[in-house]
Image (cartoon, rainbow, N blue to C red):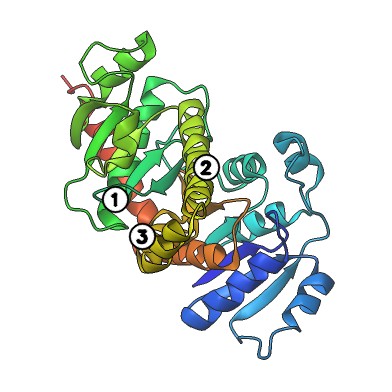
Amino acid sequence: MKIALDAMGGDSAPESPIAGAVRAAREFEDVGIVLVGLKDVIEEKLSGYPSRPPNISIAHASETIGMDESPANAVRKKRDSSINVGLDLLKQGEVQAFISAGNTGAAVAASTLKVGLLPGVERPGIAIQLPGVKGDTTLIDVGANINPKPMHLLQYALMGDAYCRYVLGRANPKVGLLNVGEEEGKGTEFIKETYDLLQTGKFNFIGNVEGHDIFSGEVDVIVCDGFAGNVALKTAESLAHAISTLLKRALSKSVITRIGAFLAHDAFAQLRAEIDYAERGGAPLLGINGISIIAHGASTGKAIKNAIRVARESVRSELNRHLVEAVAAYEQQTKPAQP
């Protein structure tokens, strides 16, 4: 198995992608990692490691897409960018997965245009794992499609259900629709139509769920449009940072609180690990005809290593085959009977 990694993508590229690649190459010896980007720069950074793992190689890309560039224009104009070159490798079958912590819009656009969609899938969706009180919840979509149709959300539900079953190992995932209330009939016409459509799917649809359910751990998959999902994701990230800052401030106010913080050090360390996005790695872009993982722009080496783990698990579990089967089964189920 080979996985291409955008070495030039992310807030701290190429240091963090390369650090993550080295960690992953040592841990996952069955995976060949192809670092995509400026060859001379990558070689220089790799030379700083005592021993270069033999399962790391380099694919040269002369251009880089910046985080603030227009995704569509950059993908079209910078054909030799690390994102385009990496996805060309995926399209050609030279690698089985691609990962980028760079410009999310560019990664989504290039994945869709170059690799294409799975049979039957109308729009891809980014599925991210968020920590909860009773376990992680998969939120889909968090930014790939901000103006979807109800059918797109139905397909997100089908794909999210399959992802939870075959990659995360959950036998009968609970699927909910993000709404402003739990009662049937709540929300906009778009949400009401989506609700009716989700009831026709052969998965465990539990109805409407609210924002607080995202972190309860009671729901395995929460479906929403990319606009609402992205707002929820960015709010969660901001809240986690704010809580950490406020807690540190409160615990440093007196000698007693500092002693308490010292005694509770292990508990705080465990809490940080549970809410750390780096533990979850990256978010799969479900629906494209290949494995494409969207990593956080601020990904550390640890986060990149775990993004490679997610890609590896997705390939090994034959995720896309299960996604195609789920969408095809629904289409067959709703196909009009022949006279």
Give the quadrant of residue 271: bottom left
Amino acid type at mark 3: Glu
Q: Which of pointers 1 and 3 lies earlier in the amino acid sequence?
A: 1
Asked if the residue under mark 3 is in contact with the one under mark 2, i.e. CB atoms within 8 Å, the reply is no
Residue 101: name its quadrant.
bottom right
- Please, what is the three-letter code of the amino acid marked with disc 1? Cys
Residue 242's tag is 2
Depth check, front residue: 336 or 107 = 107
The percent position of residue 158, horizontal first and vertical second, equals 30, 38
Q: Residues within 10 Å of mark 3 (few under 14, many from 20)?
A: few
Q: Is residue 156 left or right of residue 234?
A: left
The type of residue carrying mark 2 is Ala
- The percent coordinates of residue 229 (x first, y second) are 46, 32
Residue where numbered disc 3 is placed: 318
Q: Which residue is mark 1?
A: 164
Q: Which residue: 22% across, 54% down?
A: 170
Q: Residue 287: where, in percent of width, then height?
A: 44, 43
